[in-house]
Amino acid sequence: MMPANLRTFDRLPAGQSGQFVIPSALAPSRPVRHFFSLAGLLALLSPLAAQAQSAGSAPNDDPSYRKEFVYGLNFNTRGGLIGGVSVRSSKVLNEKWSRYWSIEGVEVKHPKERRLPSYNGSSFVRDKANYMFVLRPTFGAQRVIFRKAPESGVQINGLFGAGPSIGLLMPYYVYYDYTPRDSNYNALGPEDIRSEAYDPQKHSNLNLIFDRAPLFSGINELKPRVGAHVRGALSFEYGRYRDAVAGIETGFLLELYTKRPIIIRSLNVDENSINNRFYPSVYLTVYLGSRS
């Protein structure tokens, strides 16, 4: 005898004789029905998605596209309005991977730099002892994360690299007014304004700083600082044609120097306490280039 909980089918409504109706006790629950419906839909769409992906990626497998060369402007959290410039050369290894080398030249600024007006209407950076310029050769790998369709869309790549950091410290020169003056600030003799490397002890009276000197006044006094860096980034390529590329690269950079670069000096403050060896930053590079 059939168990009581499975003994009967639901009574057929009038006019539906001959149709088979699943007993309500045996019918799958709504979540289960939704699961199987979704599974069936994915099963139908999977071949179409695979075909579309294959069609979209096939053109980039062409062996005629083996190299890429780009150049661009760098913006970063350690620089000014424009951080610097960069070039990058890549070589395709396979459908997904490329290897690259790049060189980046930037200026690194201290976060406590403050620009002040001078009495003649010009300006200077308070407490700045040195400019710091950095060359960063980088060697790394690039992987395609999302390949764009031919002549449209955006391609997303992931990049990782590392290399040495070659820092160059160049003294910051100012024009300082040594003209003898009376209590009313009237000159008592001929004007005496000298170009000198900034020294917080020697140039303690900021009111007598006439102006900043030309950028390369201290070019003969360069001091090297050697370090290393690592970087990780995403690039978004908008190039429409196979032989040209344009896009942006955004990421982070971690940099460490063997000897502390002195960028600012302040009166009665230990320079080692206000200058760092470690320089993390976030950057964005806008680039253009070509492929061959």
Image: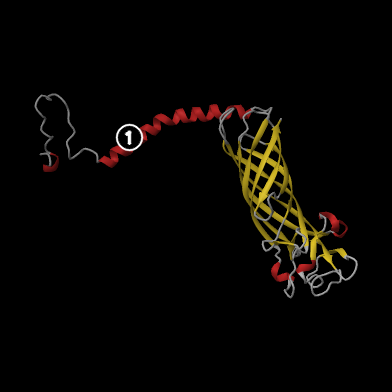
Q: Residue at x 67, y 64 (%)?
A: 112
Image-based side of 36 in relation to 211, left or right: left
Where residue 21 appears, as percent x and y from the top left, is: 17, 31
Toward the left, the furthest residue is 14
Where is the N terminus found, in terms of image quarters? top left
Image-based side of 109 in relation to 143, left or right: right
**Which one is nearer the viewer's eye here, 274 or 42?**
274
Judging from the image, the colouring scheme is secondary structure
Image-based side of 254 in relation to 37, left or right: right
**Looking at the picture, does residue 57 appear above or below residue 212?**
above
Image-based side of 152 in relation to 191, left or right: left
**Which one is nearer the viewer's eye here, 77 or 95?**
77
> Mark 1 falls on what kind of element?
helix
Q: Residue at x 67, y 31 (%)?
A: 244
Q: Residue at x 52, y 30 (%)?
A: 53
Where is the C terminus found, in terms of image quarters? top right
Where residue 82 appears, as percent x and y from the top left, is: 69, 49
**Looking at the picture, does residue 149 appear above or below residue 268?**
above
Q: Residues within 10 Å of mark 1 (few under 14, many from 20)?
A: few
Looking at the rendered structure, the kind of residue marked 1 is: Ser
Where residue 277 appears, as percent x and y from the top left, is: 71, 63
**Which one is nearer the viewer's eye here, 160 or 23?**
160
**Which one is nearer the viewer's eye here, 75 or 267?**
267
Q: Residue at x 31, y 38 (%)?
A: 34
Toward the right, the furthest residue is 190
Where residue 46 appears, as percent x and y from the top left, is: 44, 31
- Residue 147 figure quarter: top right
**Looking at the picture, does residue 112 appear above or below residue 82?**
below
Write down the residue under mark 1.
37
